[in-house]
Amino acid sequence: MANMIDYLDWRGDLSFKADSLNPVDNLVFARLSYIDFSDALSGGETLKSLATRYLPSEEKVTPGVLLNEGTKELLEAAGLSKRFGSVILKNYESKLDLDRELQFSAMTFEIDDKTAYVVFRGTDDTLVGWKEDFNMSFMDVVPAQKEASRYLNGVLKKHNYKTVYVGGHSKGGNLAIYSAVHLNRKFKSRLIQVFNNDGPGFKQSIIDREEYQDVADRIVTLIPQSSIVGLLLESGNNYKVVQSTVKGIMQHEGLSWEVMGKDFVYLPKLRRDAVIIDRTTKGMLEKMSMEQREAFSTVLFDLITVNDSKTLTDIDKGGLGSFFKMSENFRRLDRETKKVIIETLSLFFDEGYKSFIQVTELNQWQGKFKKWREEVKGEIEGFWNKF
């Protein structure tokens, strides 16, 4: 089946003036945002120019262990196309602060002098970025959300764009919504759509706020049929389900999303495994206090930060040595700290069992449970092999 690179082959010769931005264009921008464009010209540089400079260098088109595949091909297809080649990248920012547990990057893709797509990068290769994701489960506001609000207001104050799209993939989708919700009222009329590509949601108390409801009708949430990340927290159940060519958690990779024409291939509902994981995660979080969530997050990342690793790539390079080091770190934990990890995992599997029974026909549950367990095992093994 076709993906967004095929889409660029089909429609790359059609300018944005001839056909305005669509959901697939949105994902192209969101996926490109994972590339480190820090050496782009300060006044702005076209995607064609950036592609010409970046493509000969493997290092520049290698975002990290989870996003290496397809990045170079996407940049080439987009940058050398008529549709994206003349788009100008401006206002690139990237911040990493271990003390604040902050990972943030944003950029503006100027389609023409009146139209722009502001994109926020999702969780990248850095461990602190993944830690910040976990912090969303117990913090009202994480540092990256504050940065996103500052960035979007700053861009619209600096540039006189009449039409603005905002979006991102994974955590970037969450940041896009947060920035739109907290956009200065004098700029909100310029906001056309906010794209959340399989990004986590928010606490229900935030969704119920007037500021959120002001932009709710402009939010487009896209999740694959076995979504995990996009179902975290609450999204108001207002989402479209996209068909993917892969299974399980690897569906989070937007290059697996199936495209037809200038839109995605949509499905009527989520797969059963996604419903089970969603209910399991929500049930587990409901039973954990904010203090317990924070303690689990802290201990977990203390365990995986081995040999001074700062990124997933560092862990990957460590091979089996990284795995054994994590095991050794766990054995050295005191009894109470181990209890935090074990109780959380026990709660997760307990909720998983209950969720499975709830969504599965009782007279068939034994066989289906075995099949589901085998599928999950295969997906975990596939995910582990990515390292």
Image (cartoon, rainbow, N blue to C red):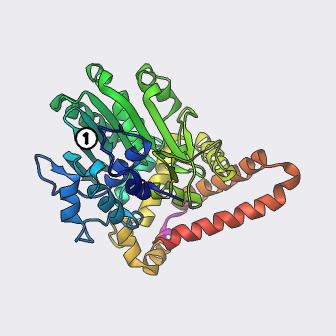
Q: Residue at x 73, y 53 (%)?
A: 353
Q: Position of residue 174 (x, y in %)?
A: 41, 40
Which quadrant of the figure has residue 6? bottom left
Q: Nearer the viewer, residue 13 or 352?
A: 13
Left or right of 293? Residue 110 is left
Residue 39 lies, in percent from the top left, at: 15, 57
Relative to 187, does residue 377 appear above or below in the rendering? below
Q: Please state the total of marks drawn on the protein image.
A: 1
Between 378 and 333, the one lying in front of the other is 378
Task: Give x and y (percent) for residue 333.
Answer: 49, 66
Magenta-colored span: 330-337
Q: Quadrant of the C terminus?
A: bottom left
Q: Amino acid at mark 1?
A: Ile
Picture quadrant where residue 55 is located: bottom left
> Which residue is the site of mark 1?
111
Q: Is residue 331 visible?
A: no
The image quadrant where one finds the N terminus is: bottom right
Q: Is residue 372 left or right of residue 134?
A: right
